Image (cartoon, helix red, strand yellow):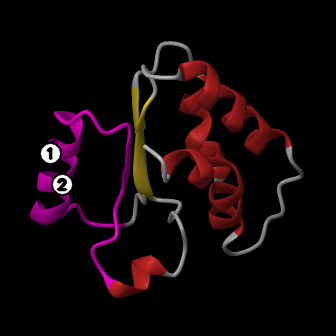
Amino acid sequence: MTWRWLPLIDQVVDSFMSRNSDSKIISREEAAVREWLVSDRIFQVMRDHPHHCIYAILGGMWGVKMNQDRAKFALAFKKMFSVNHLHKYDYDQFLLKEHIWPIAKTR
């Protein structure tokens, strides 16, 4: 599941959003994303259902504006990609909790 995050280490990517390809985009999500894109918030974490609060960040429900603090984010993303990738359910949520959430929760 982590392959979908590879654009995070691309120097030409300024904004990145991770969404599940099997999830239908609904108007509520579109409105939230549009609001985030014009805001000064660096991270966006979608939690619009009680089940979304089980994890710090769900693998397909977050975004980041890379053009602010790119070096800090790039280091975290490279650490995330360098660890042994276990192919088990929820491992992407574990990586996000360990490497991204400590940065995202303050931004």
The quadrant holding residue 25 is bottom left
Q: Does residue 106 sit above or below 58 in this rendering?
A: above
Judge by depth and name the residue closer to the eye, 89 or 36: 36
What's under tag 2, amino acid-wise? Ala
Q: Which mark is residue 35?
A: 1
Q: In which quadrant will I find the C terminus? A: top left
Q: Position of residue 28 (x, y in %)?
A: 13, 64
Q: Residue 45 bears which disc, if any?
A: none
Question: Residue shown at 18%/54% (left/top)?
Answer: 32
What kind of residue is marked 1?
A: Glu
With respect to residue 53, does 74 lie above or below? Answer: above
Q: In percent of the image, x 43 and y 60: which residue is there? A: 20
- Whether residue 18 can be seen here: no
Horizontally, residue 69 falls left or right of residue 25, namely right
- Picture coordinates of residue 30 (x, y %)? 16, 53
Magenta span: 23-49
The residue shown at (39%, 65%) is 22
Residue at disc 2, secondary structure: helix
The reply to whether callout 2 and callout 1 are in contact (CB within 8 Å) is: yes
Q: Position of residue 7 (x, y in %)?
A: 54, 30
| 83 in the magenta segment | no
Crowding at dot 2, Cα within 10 Å, few <14 / some 14-19 / many 20+, comes out as some
Q: Is residue 87 left or right of residue 5?
A: right
Q: Magenta segment: does it hold 38?
A: yes
Give the residue pinned by disc 2.
32
